[in-house]
Structure formats: C-alpha cells, structure tokens
Amino acid sequence: MASASETISTPKMIVPYEWILANVEEEPMTIASKMISFRGQKVFRVGLKNHAISPILFFMAADLGKMGMKVEDVLWGIQDGGLGPAKMTRMTNEIIGDEGNLQLFTINLAKKVIGNCTFSFRICIEGADPGYSYQLCDRLAKDQLWAAKEELNLADVDFVVKDTTFPAHKAILAARSEVFASEFEKKPLDFPRFRMDDMEPSTVENFLHFIYTGEPMGTLADEDLQELADRYGLTTLTGLCKVALMKNDVMQMEKVRKSLNSNAEELSSSKIMPEKETEIFFDRTTPTFRCPWLLKKCEQGQTTCVMQYQNEDICVAYYTGVVKRNGNYYYIWKPVIHLSCAKHRRFGLKVEDIYCCHQGYNQLLQMEPKNSRKNAELLHFAAQTDLDLYLDQVSNPVSFYFKFISTMGNYYYEMTDDSWSTDFWVAATNQKLTDVEIFVGTVKVMEAHQVILRARSPVLNESLNKIGNTAAKSIVTFGAKFDVEVVKHFLNFLYTGCLKTSDRSKQLSKLATMYGVETLKNVCQLLNANSLDVEELTNCLIQL
C-alpha cells in the first residue's frame, strides 16, 4: 500500500467583509461603499459597475502598505443564509504595476444585480516585505520585552531624542542589529548614549518597538524611520518603509480607471451604499487564518495526503468515487473530496469552515461537515466536485482553505518580522553579550540574557534581582530531575514565544508553572489534556 504524502500548512491572515446592497434599481449605475476601515485606517473599498451586460464587481486597496501589508488575493461569493457562501470565486488581480500603493481586484458577474444582495468577501493579506509574515507567537513575550525597556536597573543604553530619553538594552539591540553589536564590542564597558536630535521622539520609539517586538507601533511611512533602519541594518524594516513611502502613481490610477470603465455602456449615475461607514473588525485574541495544502496523487493511484500543523499530523485528505475508463485512461467520475481533522483541539483550534478547489480553477467549494457537533474529537468534511480526476496524472493538486479560530489566550498569529523569533535565541546560543549561565543540575547547558529571563518569568526576575548586578555572570540552576532538552525548549519559548515541539509536555508544564510562564502553561494544559473520549471518537468513525 502506498504511503500517504505529507504537506505542511502555511497560515495566512484572512479578514471577512460583507457588502449589503438593498433595493438596487434596474437602471445601470456605479454603486460603491464608503472607504472601509481596517485597524483604524481607511484602506479598502468595494463597488459594482452594474452594467446591463457583464457588470463588474471590484475590490480596491489603497495605502495598505503604510501598515506593512498588501492584499494577496480576494475571494467573493453571494451570501445565501449559511455560515458562508456555498461557492466562492477568486477575483482577478489586475496588473496595474507596483509603483504605487493601489491594488485592484475584479470579477465579471453573469448578470446585473437587482433588488437585495449580500456579497461576501474574504481578503487574504500578506506582508509588504518578504521578511514580514503571519507568525504564531506568545503575545505576552512581546509585551513583556517592550515593558522591560522601562526597567532602568537593567538598561545599559540611552537614546536621547531632543528632550526625551529612551532607555534600552545592549543585549536586545545587538541581537537584532549587527551594527549595534559591532559598536558595543568596541567599547564593552561603556554606557552608550545615542543622541538623535534630528529625529522625532515618535520615530525613535517606533524604531525601538520594531527591534523589541518585530512589529511597528506607528506609521511606516516615515523617511527618518527608514533612515534609521538603513543605518542599523534592519533590512525588513527598510523594505516595509520603502513600500509605505510609495506615492499613488499616476499610471496606476489611469490603469484602475481604464479597468473599471472598459464596458462600452455609459453609466451616468452613481450611488453610495450603504451610506454609513463600515469597518473590518479583526480581533487579534481570536484570529482566523487560512492554510492552503496540496493534495497530490501517490503511487498505485492512491490519493491520500496527511497534513501537518505545528509539526503534528492533524488532517488527512483523500478522494472517493466511481472509477471509469476512457480508452486507455482511467478516471474517477466527479470525485468526492474528503477531509478529516483530528487533534485540532490540542492546539486550541476550532474549525469554522473549510473550502477546497482544484489548482488552476478559481472556484472554491464549501466542504459540508458530516458531524453534528462542530468541535467534536474527529471532524469529517466532504465536497462533490464536477471535475473528473484522471488517475494517470502525476499529481492532482487540491488547495484547502481552513478558517480556524484560536481559543488559546495570548497565543495566536500576527504579522511580524520573521527574524524576530530567531534573533534573540541565536544571540543566546552564540553567547553574544550573555550575562547568565544556565545549569541543569551540575551540567552547564547554555548561556542567556538577564533582560529576557527577567522580563519573561516573574520567578526568574525575583531570583536574579536578589543576585544583583555583578561583574561575574549570574547562574540559574534547574533541578537535575528535568531533562536537558526540555529545559532548552523551555528557554527557547522564553526567547521566541513559540513552542517548537509537543514532546515531553508534562515536564514543560511543570517548568511553566514553577516559573510563572502563563502562556506556556496554558499551551501545555491543552497538550496534556486527556480529551480523547472513546465513545465520541467511535461515534465519529462509524458516523453515528
């Protein structure tokens, strides 16, 4: 029997929006929403060129780059009373150039809209720079590191900006910037004071916030911020600022106008609908995201694919259907695509809905749940396709679009600098400005940084505070009962805010509880929970 192929999920930020049209008249006209707010900024707009023949539905993004983001793609469908449209279609990303901060997505409708209609959109958003993406992280890690900046007894650097002083830490700055690291190595005993009177305090604070958290706290459309990023080698921040500073290009605007007015029919009237301003709400504590996976054909015609999330198998997909013959070729006639989800509850995930589509086709089908309970131990979904599946093809890629909701507080996805989660840990393993030695029993495991340990654990903060500042490196000793690799994973979580393994979660849970690391404690509680109910599981398997 052929072994199942494996594929790893790639989370994507996705935000929903519903555009409600009421009492649309028969007269051809242009209908548009007001600018739609997202995270406090007016950046989106939807509209309809409601021609008698080939009306155009459009979605526009403007100045999203100032927030470090851009639209990857847009799906649309007509809301029909369920949780989502039965079918969704990918809109066309119009080629208008990348010289400015405009994006346009369009789709030609089969007929003119009359009366009432609700269009449902799902907007997939990615970082405006390749090094800025949707990452899983303990939000407390970022909050705690940023708050540590105010701990003056640990600060060993000052940024003086006009009449404002920002304390900071050599270890943090050096981990994130080789330029800072080089300066500190030249004069290791100095207490540097960087004067930046030609900058605004808000710019320097935004710069430091990106260093400490991997995220901006203000606008990225700031020439001085870009200059600081260039000066200190923060390549991702430089790229984000370059995009944010782009002006609306004349050629882009002309291409947008041309794309939306290509129909020969003149539209003499227009209407704003709805008249009130609307907003896309994105609750960071319960985020939704999309995970596309590819289902490929295996040997001997098998089409099973195991899918991974956080290094664990949580889904399996396969085809079923009647095999027919066309000459020398065999195919599955209108196959059913199946998807089963398990272990999702271990990661605090609830499945809201799933869509699937064959690669190369723009239409997505909503998969129907075959369980009565949405958060059952084992979930099963299926979708009937209209495309025949030829078994001799090298692969039959299918993309699955999952909408999950994370129920685990402080541990969820957000746009962030990719290198943020690794820079601090690399600095520790390379002993760059480390001031703490870590032992397990009598065995030295590694070295670390006081500022990070004290920010992340109240227990370590108290114990290290008692030792005080000394010329020698402080020592933190974990009990010999703990496995060395488990202690490393614990420390890695303190540094990166992300758990890399679910192995030995009981020992990790003890460490998290002992040292007051709340998010890790919650993660381990889910991993250790005996959620397997045999009766419920067998009911799902035999489809009772």
Image (cartoon, rainbow, N blue to C red):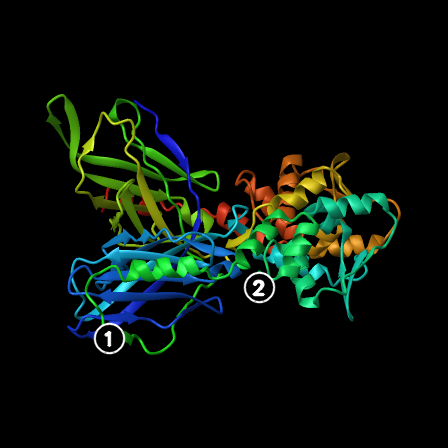
Q: Which residue corresponds to the image point at 49% horizontal and 56% vertical from the top-left?
A: 69
In this rendering, the answer to whether 139 lies above or below 201 is above
Nearer to me, 63 or 365? 63
Q: Residues within 10 Å of mark 1 (few under 14, many from 20)?
A: few
Tell whether 191 sits left or right of 179.
right
Nearer to me, 223 or 8? 223
Q: Which residue corresponds to the image point at 62% horizontal and 50% vertical from the top-left?
A: 512
Q: Quadrant of residue 211?
A: bottom right
Residue 302 can be seen, yes or no: yes
Q: Position of residue 461 (x, y in %)?
A: 74, 55
- Secondary structure beneath dot 2 equals loop
**Label 1 sits on residue:** 269
Q: Position of residue 521 (x, y in %)?
A: 57, 52
Residue 138 can be seen, yes or no: no
Q: Which residue corresponds to the image point at 38% horizontal and 53% vertical from the top-left?
A: 96
Q: Amino acid at mark 2?
A: Thr
Alpha carbons under labels 1 and 2: distance apart:
37 Å
